[in-house]
Image (cartoon, rainbow, N blue to C red):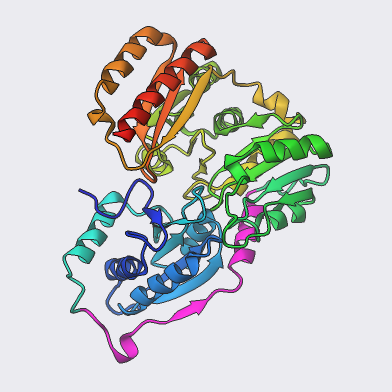
Amino acid sequence: MRRLFGTDGVRGVANTYPMTTEIAMQIGRGIAFLVKETGHRSRIVIGKDTRVSCYMIENALAAGICSMGVNVLLVGPLPTPGIAFITTSMRADAGVVISASHNPFQDNGIKIFSRDGFKLPDEQEADIEDLIFSQKMAALRPVADDVGKAVRIDDARGRYVVFLKHTFPKKYTLDDFHIVLDCANGATYGVAPHVFEELGAKVTAIGVAPDGKNINHECGALYPKLIAEKVRATGADLGIALDGDGDRVIICDEKGDVVNGDHIMAICAADLMSRKKLRKKTLVTTVMSNMGLEVAMQRLGGKMVRTKVGDRYVVEEMRKNKYNFGGEQSGHLIFLEHNTTGDGILAALQILSIMIKQRKPLSELASIMEPFPQVLKNVRTSKRLDIDLIPGFRDRIENIEQEIGTDGRILVRASGTEPVIRVMVEGKEYDTINTMGDELCEIVRKADAY
């Protein structure tokens, strides 16, 4: 039974359990205990997004790590994929990200990368929990010269900018592009504009004035209408919306139409297949991806493998079976030949390179996939609900599945990071599946009210 870690690290409302400074310090001590090696002064990278609560959590983590005799490298606000890159680039023993990704500012979280840049496996997260709750570290307190220290790495942003630019073909520039860029007032604000501008693009940047509280607030990847409106108003070539920690991207085309992660995966998978670069002709995605993506892959002569929701599970499947490209409908795109985790800026650069190579606008490229009608509905609850314990809920789901048959899908799940029940229904007729989705959401609301 997990007590701290969920599907993507530890997450909750900042300054309430489990996102307290006390727990953060213990997590820092646990990470340090796991990576510490005899005869070697281990080092752990800590980065964060722009939430006001990141400062207190950063200091608590650093204190815990140093108290175990391990040094800390502080990189400040940096996208999650940037911290994965810095961890491997600097040969650090682990990397820690303080972020609640796309959640509102009052939330925060802690995600951990191993020295290889991949998220810490479930087993090691369980080991950290055991160390914390068993009090095994209580007597392990180094003194004098054995205590760790924290130093700041001032050029981390610059290193990451250079890395990203190197993923873009050297023979191309963005001189002919006008890009609307929304950084969600998050961790990419000091990186993304430089990347696209240094490659030659004209950038209209929004969401680049973080104040600690406006991260993800009616901007970024969760609110793509903002870039769509700006693209239409300015006549830009495309819009790029990143989320608070920069590991996901949603794009809109020159007409202001939103292009989600499924369409982006279809475009990139087709390009990789044309260059014989898609390993085993296989795209890895989750159960949330539209059936239209599966049809598009079959048409290309490839196949699609689904995992449960969460980019970490996509990566695990890719590593296990040696696939090299995958992602989520929400905009996590993982190019394993470039980075170890989802990277919104990197994914946008791949799309731009395909547009240049094929000399086509994004609207034309996106036509590679015809999505099935799909509705996604979220029900925020006052407490975490077990959907299996809601009276009659599973029976109604089974009835709907029988009604849809093979022409659609239904997926209901509890969020792993917040008290939300997510309902997805897919089928041939929008009005029908929308009504089904509303009915299921109403059952959840009534159960939450009791």
Residue 102 image position (x, y, % from top left): 51, 47
Residue 166 image position (x, y, % from top left): 65, 53
Please say whether residue 164 is one of the residues in the magenta stretch. yes
Image-based side of 414 in relation to 150, left or right: left
Choose between 287 and 243: the one closer to the eye.
Answer: 243
Residue 76 image position (x, y, % from top left): 54, 68
Choose between 227 and 52: the one closer to the eye.
Answer: 52
User: Residue 217, can we see it?
Assistant: yes
The magenta stretch is: 140-167
Residue at 66% across, 21% down: 367
User: Residue 352, can we see it?
Assistant: no
Residue 432 image position (x, y, % from top left): 48, 11
Q: Quadrant of the C terminus?
A: top left
**Mark count:** 0
Residue at 34% across, 69% down: 28
| Residue at the far front in the pictured view | 450
